[in-house]
Amino acid sequence: PVAAALARTAVFGPDAVDGNRVPRLAGEGIEGPKDRIGPATRGAALYRAGRFEEAFEALERNLAAHAAGGTTFDWAFLSMACHRLGRPDEARDWFDRLERALEDGGPDEASWAERLTVRLLREEAGKLLTE
């Protein structure tokens, strides 16, 4: 859906989100219980809107709902949300999981755009964790 695509694009970089509009768009784009991208995008949009606790909860619910244990996109935002919530050990754990996945080449099915996005998010998270 268009709403989900717009929301997904808006969360790629910091300061790109209207506090309420993008999380709402992301919520509208969720297609049902098997949708992994919509809920992850909503969690990322909540993070970008500065709603860190809500972001963490949304991302964590998304992980729990899917047996795969999440994606590199999820882990980048979980790392940053945990850092903002004052949970540095948990932030580091998510970041390390992201790093290991990227060292292993990342998901094979990811497009070049997804791989680039995750590398940019990894750079952002890494800088944040060293603040």
Image: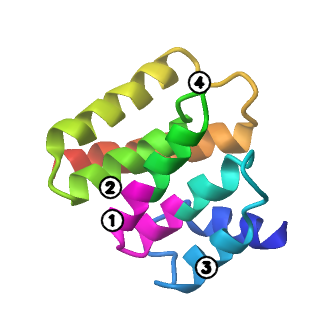
Describe the element under mark 2 as helix, strand or loop.
Answer: helix
Mark 4 and mark 3 lie on one chain; the one further toward the N terminus is 3
Residue 54 relative to residue 36: left or right: left
Circles 2, 3 touching at the beta carbon (< 8 Å): no
| C-alpha span from label 4 to label 3 | 29 Å
| C-alpha span from label 2 to label 3 | 19 Å
Describe the element under mark 3 as helix, strand or loop.
Answer: helix
| C-alpha span from label 1 to label 2 | 5 Å
Residue 81, numbered label: 2
Q: Is most of the magenta stretch helix, strand or loop?
A: helix
Q: Quadrant of residue 26?
A: bottom right
- Which residue is nearer to you in this view: 107 or 60? 60
Residue 24, numbered label: 3
Residue 110 at x, y percent in the picture: 72, 33
Depth check, mark 4 against mark 3: the one in front is 3
Residue 52, numbered label: 1
Circles 4, 2 touching at the beta carbon (< 8 Å): no
| C-alpha span from label 3 to label 1 | 15 Å
Circles 1, 2 touching at the beta carbon (< 8 Å): yes
